[in-house]
């Protein structure tokens, strides 16, 4: 797993000078094999059991270094600090196994307007023997201008089916397993420098933890689509709720406000 410390330093030092209206068309490719010890650390921190199949969220962390390289590389129009990860959709056509060699590709796509600025997608795909079997679309928002005010009343939280206590070191533990050492997740002091009262949980940890709650109940081919709502402060406690739908599940994480809402379909 690549250490991203130098890339984050590069983003902090050079990113604020960036301006642009287009995404670079470059892609990054990598041939990967899964490290069983790394997979075990990821499974433990996210709540997955020990299995030969990769959790549907796991290839995201294998591609994360390439994602950051594209967003700190030549031609990328936005500074990395301040980008908000607002959504993630992962589609799995069949289970991936730990022993399989994986071909990974990362690209940027679909820069488009948003009521609060501009947003774009980071698309990561995994192929095995030339067949695309897994696709991840992470949507990021670049806020520009005045922040939009909430006009709708706050919804009532759903009845939780479980409550999870999240320790203060959760961000550091997930960073060790994912390579995502963004300072807003690591310590209260570094999080305060970016406007947060305490460290916040990684959005992709919260998604993975929710998916782990369905382990053993999902079909081989399925899609997990989430929207990240508000940050989860660490330490903290969240309520997890789920309900069946016609072809899958709806789920959410709440405390005194919504943190994540998602749908599993297959």
Image (cartoon, grey):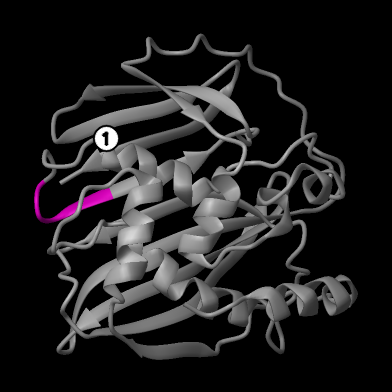
Secondary element at image label 1: loop
Q: Which residue is mark 1?
A: 213
Is 144 rendered above or below residue 120?
above
How far across and down, in percent of the image, does residue 165 sit? Answer: 48, 26
Name the magenta segment's main secondary structure: loop
Q: Residue at x 27, y 57 (%)?
A: 56
Kindly identify the residue that appears in the image at 77 percent across and 42 percent down. 188
Asked whether 252 or 214 is in front, the reply is 214
At horizontal 17% and vertical 68% (from top left) the residue drawn is 96
Q: Is residue 16 above or below residue 249?
A: below
Q: Position of residue 73 (x, y in %)?
A: 68, 86
Q: Considering depth in this image, is 175 or 66 the residue closer to the camera? A: 175
Q: Quadrant of residue 160?
A: top left
Q: Position of residue 229 (x, y in %)?
A: 57, 35
The percent coordinates of residue 176 (x first, y second) are 52, 62
Q: Is residue 261 magenta?
A: no
Region in magenta: 219-223
Q: Is residue 239 left or right of residue 199?
A: left
Q: Residues within 10 Å of mark 1 (few under 14, many from 20)?
A: some
**Total count of labels:** 1
The residue under the point 38% across, 36% down is 262
Q: Left or right of 160: which side holds 18? A: right
């Amino acid at each position: 797993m690549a250490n991203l410390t130098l890339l984050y330093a590069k983003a902090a030092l050079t990113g604020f000078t960036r301006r642009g209206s287009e995404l670079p068309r470059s892609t990054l490719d990598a041939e990967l094999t899964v490290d069983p010890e790394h997979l075990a650390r990821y499974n433990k921190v996210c709540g997955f059991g020990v299995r030969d199949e990769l959790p549907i969220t796991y290839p995201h962390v294998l591609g994360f270094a390439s994602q950051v390289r594209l967003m700190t590389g030549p031609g990328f129009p936005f500074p990395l600090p301040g980008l908000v990860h607002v959504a993630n959709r992962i589609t799995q056509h069949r289970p991936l196994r730990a022993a399989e060699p994986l071909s990974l590709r990362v690209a940027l796509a679909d820069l488009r307007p948003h009521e609060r600025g501009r947003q774009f997608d980071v698309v990561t795909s995994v192929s095995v023997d030339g067949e695309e079997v897994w696709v991840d679309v992470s949507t990021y928002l670049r806020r520009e201008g005045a922040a939009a005010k909430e006009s709708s009343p706050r919804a009532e939280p759903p009845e939780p089916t479980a409550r999870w206590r999240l320790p203060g070191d959760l961000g550091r533990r997930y960073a060790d397993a994912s390579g995502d050492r963004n300072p807003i997740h690591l310590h209260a002091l570094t999080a305060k420098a970016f406007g947060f009262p305490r460290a916040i949980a990684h959005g992709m940890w919260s998604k993975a933890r929710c998916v782990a709650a369905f382990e053993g109940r999902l079909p081989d081919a399925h899609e997990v689509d989430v929207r990240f709502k508000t940050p989860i402060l660490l330490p903290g406690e969240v309520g997890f709720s789920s309900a069946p739908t016609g072809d899958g599940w709806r789920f959410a994480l709440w405390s005194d406000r919504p943190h994540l809402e998602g749908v599993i379909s297959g």
